[in-house]
Every structure is written in C-alpha cells, then in structure tokens.
Amino acid sequence: MKVPFSTFVPKTFMVRLGLGILILNLFVILMTVVSLRQSWRNHQELASAAAQNLAQVLDRYVADTFSKADLALWAVKDEIERPTTPPANGRRDLEAFIRRQLERAPGLLALRTTDAQGVINHGGGPETATIVTLADREHFIRLRDVPNVGLVISKPLVGKLTGTWVIILARRLERPDHSFAGMVHAVIELSQFDKAFAALDVGAHGSVALRDLDLGLIARFPSPARSGTAIGQKVVSDELQAFAWSGRNSGIYKARTPFDRVQRTFSVRRVSEWPCYLLVGLAEQDYLYGWRRETAQQLAGVGLFACLTLVTSWLIHRSWLRQQATQANLEQLLAEVKTLGGMLPICSHCKKIRDDKGYWNKLEAYLNEHTDAEFTHGICPECAKEVFPRSSGRNTTL
C-alpha cells in the first residue's frame, strides 16, 4: 500500500523553499527600486542642467537686445544734444542718423524722438509719418518730471503706431539749460521674444517666460491664453514669489504652473543688469518619459522573474514529492524483502517455518503472508510414482 505524498513533506522543507523564493524576489525588487531611484535622480539633474543652460542662452539674448537698444538711445541722445549743423540740413541728417542706428540694432522695431509736448518728431520705423502724441504715456511723464531718472523701461503696452504689444526703452532729451526737450525711445515688439523662445527645444510641454521685477508677464511661450490677454498679468506660483522675495539672481525650483497646472522644473534668473526675470521650465511628463518607460520595462522584468521563480519552486516541490514517494516505496519494498532475508528456521522433515513469535507455519502459508505470491497445488512426477504407483507415466497434476 502506497503512502500519501503529503506524509513525506516535512514542514522545514516547505518553509525553507518559501523563504528562499521570498528572499530572492525581495532582493531583485530592492535592486530594481534602487536602480530606478538613481535613474530618476539622474533625469532630474539632467533636466535642471538643461533648464539652466537654456536660461543662460536666453539671458544673453535678452540682455543683448536691451543693451543694443540703449546704445542706440545714447547715440541719438548725444547727436541731438550736441551743437547741430545748420537748420537746413539738420532734420534730414538727424533722420538719416536715426535710421542708421535702427539698422544696427535689428532687435528694434522703431527708434523715435518726441518734442517736449510728447509729439513724435523724428525717427524710423512703421507709420513714422503719422502724427502721434505720447504725452499720456507713463514713461514720458516720468522722464519729464524726474530729470535724473536715466533709462526708463515701460510696462508692456499696445503701440499707438504699430497696434501690437511692445515694450519701450526711453531716455530724456535736454536743452543746453537742462530743461526738458522731449525723449528718445526704442520700440521692441514682444513677438520677437515669442519667436526666440519658440526656437528653443523645451519639450512638448515646456515653457519660457519673461517677467518684469513686479512679476508681470512680458512674453511667454507657449502663449497661456488668447493672443495678448495674459500680458501683464501677475498670477504666479508661490515658489516664484518666494524666489523674487529672496533677492537672489538665479535659482532652481519645481512648481505647478497656474496657467495649465503642468508640473515643471524651472530655472529662473534675473537678466544681467536689466529689471526682468527669465524663466525656463521643463515639464516632468517630458523629461521623465524615458524614465517611466524604463520603469515599466524593469517592473515587467521583475514580474516575469517572480513568475519564473514561482514556477521553478513549484517544479522543485513536485520533483521533491515524487522523489520522496519513490524513496518511500523503495524503502517499503526493501523492508518486505528484508523480511524473507537472513536465516529462516525451517523443519528438516515437514518443511514448516518458524515465525518471530515462535509458531511453526506451513511454507506456503508463510510465503503467502510475507509476499504477494499465490499458490496452486499439484504433484511432481517423483512423488506421483511414490504416491500413485499404478498411475505412473500419466499426468498427475490436480
């Protein structure tokens, strides 16, 4: 009779097998987590470095645009305030001079002057023939009322001649007695910043923005709303406000942009010597795309490994069960064979065998009890001659 397999499964073997599989899988999971964590940090550091590099490039671009505009203002201011040529040629020569300065600063849309009443009287750019007064502009009023104010940069506004969003850089013009004679101003169209920002590779969900020191929006890519409606707004993240209050010139922070609720890593810096901030933001969903794909692949690998170890452990368990069952059956057979082995007490006359209890049993009864052999009775030829002498030579099997 076979013994059930379960009786051959010691608890210690099952516990050791289970613990071994568990420890192996936990080790693989731990290594995967460590690897993915390090990869995540690498992606974050690369994104921060990329944002800083892009911010530095744009810093030079914006600073260069403002610097060239101010150089053009100084040149025109010096030309107007120095002793002029005779009146017959003075206006024509000044117009030509202003056009030359405008050509040398391709980032400028227009370069113009006004008289003391704010009326545009000289300059190059679109619609220069139109008579327009700028006496109501904040930058004009400030230059008129504050003699030593220096360079004035306006907030974003819609140009009266261009009809587009522009920013104005202006300086005061003075007569020989230092009284107010008007202003010279350079016009920078904000769309040129949008074009420059769009040329950068900031990813499908990245952003670039230029803001003044009050955090008012000057330019942004991509546009946060319909054309022009967001310019000047001051809805910013708490992280950007904290940076502005800190007084630092550059920094890195993470924030969710109020415009679109996209989580980004930002590099922010104050443009060199100019009253504005430049922000470059790289979206997590862009720069972590590769990391997420890597995570999915590694998790799939861990799951496959776990399945393989479970299948392998099940096969080991089944094989061990079969081995134990075979061993048990073998031991049982050996035990039965061993019962008939050794010295058997047998009667020399009647051929009975003595068992372990001292009883004498017939040979066929003893073998029938201790083996699977079964007996049929007959008579051999020698015995037949002795028992049945008259039937000699005939078949005597009963």
Image: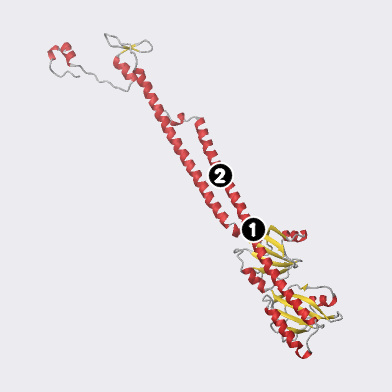
> From what the image shows, is residue 300 above or below residue 12?
below
Residue receiving disc 2 = 29
Residue 365: percent from the left, percent from the top? 31, 16
Q: Residues within 10 Å of mark 1 (few under 14, many from 20)?
A: some
Question: Which is more foreground, mark 1 or mark 2?
Answer: 1
Residue 124 visible from this viewpoint:
no
User: Which dot marks residue 193?
Assistant: none
Secondary structure found at label 1: helix
Residue 28: percent from the left, percent from the top? 54, 43
User: Which dot marks residue 49?
Assistant: 1
* Disc 2 residue type (three-letter): Ile
Image quadrant of residue 378? top left
Q: Residues within 10 Å of mark 2 (few under 14, many from 20)?
A: some
Give the left or right position of residue 56, taking residue 115 as reference. Answer: left
Q: CA distance from mark 1 to mark 2?
A: 30 Å
Give the left or right position of residue 14, taking residue 247 as reference. Answer: left
Q: Nearer the viewer, residue 352 or 160?
A: 160
Name the residue: 44% across, 31% down.
5
Secondary structure found at label 2: helix
* Disc 1 residue type (three-letter): Ala
Residue 1: percent from the left, percent from the top? 38, 26
Q: Which residue is most to the right?
A: 177
Q: Nearer the viewer, residue 142 or 309?
A: 142
Name the residue: 67% across, 66% down.
58
Tell me the quadrant of the picture where the C terminus can be found.
Answer: top left
Q: Earlier in the sequence, mark 1 or mark 2?
A: 2
